[in-house]
Amino acid sequence: MIIRVSEAGAVAIEDHDLFTGFHVDAPVGHTAEDIAAVLGEGTRADDRHHVWIAADAVRHWVADLATEEWEEGFTEMVDYARGRGWMDESGTHIRAHLEHRD
């Protein structure tokens, strides 16, 4: 799943049903703080290369596309992230890597 942020700040979800990868695709020059502000929904910067994104925000963004099968896959992804230490202490936010595109 890719969360793509445009230069204008529009947010789009790509590969919403691909649960083996999760990152934010951001324009060059945008900091983690910039991306957190654009994404809203409780997103916060972790460090220069990561943001914490609420699992419920992801559900909200894909609500029109989500099926019962999608929810099962997403829940498995969240459980995997939890096991790898990629969930915050509250268990509500997933750590996402920022990838900057040219």
Image (tube, helix red, strand yellow):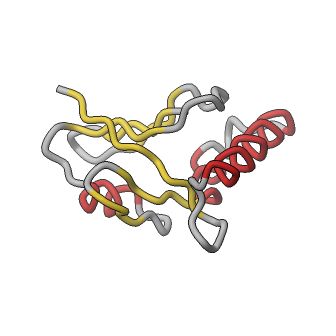
| Residue drawn at the location 60% of the way across and 59% of the way down | 87
Residue at the bottom extreme, as displayed:
90
| Residue situated in front as seen by the camera: 86 or 18 | 86
- Assign the N terminus to one quadrant of the image: top right
| Residue situated in front as seen by the camera: 25 or 60 | 25
Relative to residue 35, is residue 22 depicted above or below?
A: above
Q: Is residue 91 left or right of residue 86?
A: right
Relative to residue 67, is residue 93 depicted above or below?
A: below
Residue 78 rendering spot, x and y as whole percentages: 69, 49
| Residue drawn at the location 32% of the way across and 36% of the way down | 99
Quarter of the view holding residue 44 = bottom left
Residue 49 rendering spot, x and y as whole percentages: 30, 49
- Assign the C terminus to one quadrant of the image: top left
| Residue drawn at the location 35% of the way across and 63% of the way down | 45
Q: In this view, does 26 lie to the left or right of 102?
A: right
Residue at the left extreme, as displayed:
29
Residue 33 rendering spot, x and y as whole percentages: 26, 62
Quarter of the view holding residue 56 = bottom right
Residue 61 rendering spot, x and y as whole percentages: 57, 48
Quarter of the view holding residue 67 = top right
| Residue drawn at the location 57% of the way across and 66% of the way down | 88
